[in-house]
Image (cartoon, rainbow, N blue to C red):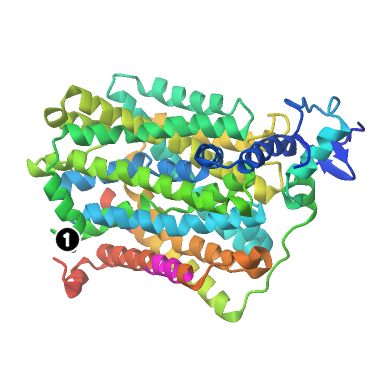
Amino acid sequence: MDRPLSSGSGFDGGSANEDDLAAVVASLEPDQIISTKEKHHCPRRKLTRAEMVVFWSLRIYLVFMFGVVLYQIWSGVR
Amino acid sequence: MPLKGDPTPSERMATSGGVVISHEDIDRAHDRDRVSEIRAKRGTWSRARLLWLLVGPGILVMLGENDGPSMLSYAATGARFGIGFFLPFVVLTFVMACVVQEMTVRLGAATHRGHAELIFDRFGPFWGWFSMVDLMVGNFLTLVTEFIAIRAGLGYFGVRPAVSVLGAWLVLFVALMAHRYWTWERITLVAAMFNLVFVPVALLSHPHWSAIGSALVTWKPFPGVTPEIILILLSNIGATVTPWMLFFQQSAIADKGLTTHDIRFGRIDTLLGATLAALAALATIIATAPLFAHGMSTGNFEAAEFAQALRPFVGNWGSALFALGMFEAGMVAAVTISTSSAYAFGEVAHRPHSLNLPFQQGKSFYLVLILEAAAAAGLVLIPGIPLVYIVLVVNVIAVLAMPPALLFLYMLVNDREIMGDLVSPWWANVLALAVVAVLVGAGLLFGISVVAPHALTLIGGK
């Protein structure tokens, strides 16, 4: 950080000066700046067959176990 | 300074050297500026100040997870089974929580993105929506239980349900008014520290220190394998490791602006939070152990009933502190859980999502947060709704939903394309996979105990 932000830089769009804004850019890592983050998203990765199997297995496990929870509630109510 | 009049998703406000700067960037830059200034100094005092600046998400997530149903689960554990096996077991669950949450620290600091956003980006909307539905369903049910805890805790002092629930919702609303992550974090941290009121309650119960020491070392007496024990084991696991914690801590780290230079402090933050939360959890078990020792039936107790039953053992002050602790547990968790939902929604809907945003710019973020809490609070006030079932199953649901959530986390934290050299070392992967195995095993054991309880005898059960 070369120059600290002026205390309470009063950033309301109209009152911020160029130095303050440059200091903001210097303070943050490039991908911390919101506009940059919005422009650059992490690319989609391709799942391998093994990964897909694990994903689906855990999804089926979850659905099944939710069924068990519902059964437990139903038997509790009875 | 030329302004962009056209509001965009981030409501940008100005540009510098071609880079568009938003209000959120300015606030975060102020925070980073303070960190850089302190980091440049040497000495113990500067280190301590740096730690003060960088702690927050880890303590909040751990103490936030010591929520209404969690404290109720610990209270039920002590009252029904004493300290024996469960004291070291709860310590183990916090070790598991540390292993899991450390991964979110690295992920948040390395990518500066929230968990939901990364899942959608890297795995696509199909898997992304699955994880979002898991999160939102779990969060809403848990939020309902937080308001039940708030109602029960304040009910001990004679506060009417409508007043306690609406009052808590207003506190949540007011905490957001600072429109500053830092201020919100400090207010919530102070509130979270009240979770430690369970420690004096434990001391007032005159615990047997030698029995506690022996239990922590020997894990005995082991209570056996019954459906009831399995349910309480699952509840205790769900009291420390849940999906919302992953989403919250990673998003909070991104919102706070932590970078890879801060990972060490992020780990300390997580460890500190786990230590404080474990202390409060163990204290709750110890505090209610006299009910077990005196053979009192506590099967259907709710929070306020525990406080009343404890009065002969811990006195008026002790039972009042217990009730206050229940209120605090629900209050802090209501704040952190609704925030985790709002972060996730903003990340997925590509809407501004930060506690640094003024209300006008972060309208959707704040509305999700406030409305989700309002819906949960409203549900608690509807007469005749069987809320007791939600309290019973909410921790169980958290444990069941955790393995798929952990799989996303495991794959993201080992993704060299986004993590670079910060991918998990082999031993961290072994620990993470061990946590997944424990959670899946506990879930399957629960399934067996419900569907075919007689099968438990095959594994030494009763």
Main secondary-structure element of the magenta-colored stretch: helix
**Residue B435 inside the magenta-drawn segment:** yes
Q: Position of residue B125 (x, y in %)?
A: 66, 61
Q: Residue at x 60, y 25 (%)?
A: B177
Q: Magenta span covers which residues?
A: B429-437
| Residue behind mark 1 | B218
Q: Position of residue B138 (x, y in %)?
A: 46, 49
Q: Residue at x 30, y 24 (%)?
A: B155
Q: Residue at x 26, y 31 (%)?
A: B322
Q: Quadrant of the N terminus of chain A?
A: top right
Is residue B12 visible from the viewing direction of this image?
no
Q: Secondary structure at mark 1?
A: helix
Q: Is residue B53 left or right of residue B377?
A: right
Pick out the residue farthest to the right.
Answer: B2
Depth check, front residue: B45 or B250: B45
Q: Where B434 sits versus B192, above or below?
A: below
Q: Position of residue B270 (x, y in %)?
A: 46, 49
Pick out the residue farthest to the front.
Answer: B43
Three-letter amino acid code at the position of disc 1 = Thr
Q: Position of residue B432 (x, y in %)?
A: 45, 66
Q: Quadrant of residue B459?
A: bottom left
- Which of the chains bears the disc numbered 1? B
Q: Residue at x 51, y 34 (%)?
A: B373
Query: How would you rate the neighbour count of disc 1 (Cα within 10 Å): few for under 14, some for 14-19, many for 20 or more?
Result: few
